[in-house]
Image: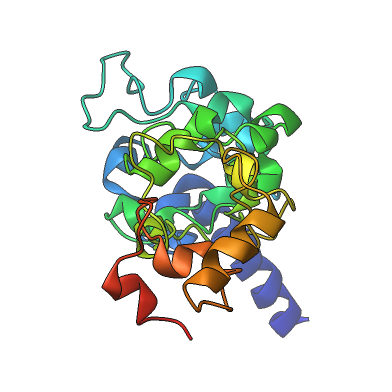
């Protein structure tokens, strides 16, 4: 009986201590800097025996202003300004991306972001969140808002493709992508005939007069759309 009594008494004492000082006995690690005021108030974020709950998060963090205002209501200054995409997330998804007890550095508390947590409308409208990410090169100036034709959500790596390496989109060639690339999703194929009043037969005759028989790849010689091909274009990509 004595060992059992000791065990029960110890369990009661430990339970009482855990209830009185959970931040000491149950704390798996220090809270991030912004949550230091809550380090002795575990129930601000946790439900008994159920862990952290997203509903507790939104009691302090209003979803539609996250990234714009802090919990005190003051404006957050950032350049470029942050996108308030949290308003398009489920109210029950906070813990899918965020955790804590990883140290003072807030960056260590963020898990890998998953686009499937976004609302369906946001998943289809990339520019709504990435409006400050769109490059200002000639290619993207003419591109429409359908980012998914070139980018995926599995990893955000801004495209390093240089369109000018193949053809310069100058003031005379500000056409939409689909004008030249008529096969959706296959940008290796293109045509110049949707704008230029040439026919394949006429082009064959003109080029053969010059002794040119491999003329199907217009951009090999006409990198900038000029009538005469540059030497640099003719030397590359046989």
Residue 232: x %, y % from top left: 28, 74
- In the image, taking residue 102 as reference, residue 216 lies left or right, namely right
- In the image, taking residue 175 as reference, residue 74 lies left or right, namely left
> 44 above or below 199?
above
Check the image and tell me how it is coloured.
Answer: rainbow
Q: Which is nearer the eye, 110 or 129?
A: 129
Residue 20: x %, y % from top left: 48, 46
Q: Residue furthest front?
A: 209
Is residue 52 at all visible to an observer of this figure?
A: no
Is residue 167 at all visible to an observer of this figure?
A: yes
- In the image, taking residue 17 as reference, residue 164 lies left or right, namely left
Residue 222: x %, y % from top left: 41, 60
> 11 above or below 92?
below
Please identify the quarter of the rendering in which residue 109 is found: bottom left
Q: Which is nearer the eye, 199 or 184?
A: 199
Q: Residue at x 35, y 31 (%)?
A: 82
Q: Which is nearer the eye, 168 or 115?
A: 168
Q: Which is nearer the eye, 177 or 135?
A: 177
Please identify the quarter of the rendering in which residue 205 is found: bottom right
Q: Residue furthest top?
A: 73
């Amino acid at each position: 009986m004595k060992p059992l009594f000791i065990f029960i008494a110890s369990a009661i004492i430990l339970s009482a201590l855990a209830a009185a000082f959970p931040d000491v006995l149950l704390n798996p690690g220090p809270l991030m800097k912004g949550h230091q005021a809550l380090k002795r108030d575990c129930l601000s974020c946790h439900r008994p025996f159920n862990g952290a709950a997203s509903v507790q998060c939104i009691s302090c963090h209003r979803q539609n202003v996250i990234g714009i205002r802090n919990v005190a209501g003051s404006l957050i200054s950032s350049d470029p300004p942050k996108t308030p995409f949290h308003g398009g997330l489920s109210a029950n998804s906070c813990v899918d991306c965020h955790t804590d007890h990883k140290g003072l550095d807030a960056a260590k508390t963020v898990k890998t972001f998953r686009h499937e947590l976004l609302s369906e409308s946001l998943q289809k409208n990339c520019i709504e969140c990435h409006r400050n990410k769109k490059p200002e090169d000639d290619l993207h100036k003419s591109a429409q808002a359908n980012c998914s034709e070139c980018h995926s959500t599995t990893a955000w790596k801004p495209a390093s493709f240089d369109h000018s390496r193949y053809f310069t989109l100058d003031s005379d060639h500000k056409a939409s992508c689909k004008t030249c690339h008529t096969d959706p999703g296959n940008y290796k194929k293109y045509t110049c005939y949707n704008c230029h009043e040439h026919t394949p037969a006429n082009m064959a005759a003109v080029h053969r007069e010059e002794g040119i028989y491999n003329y199907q790849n217009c951009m090999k010689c006409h990198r900038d759309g000029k009538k005469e091909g540059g030497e640099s274009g003719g030397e590359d990509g046989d």
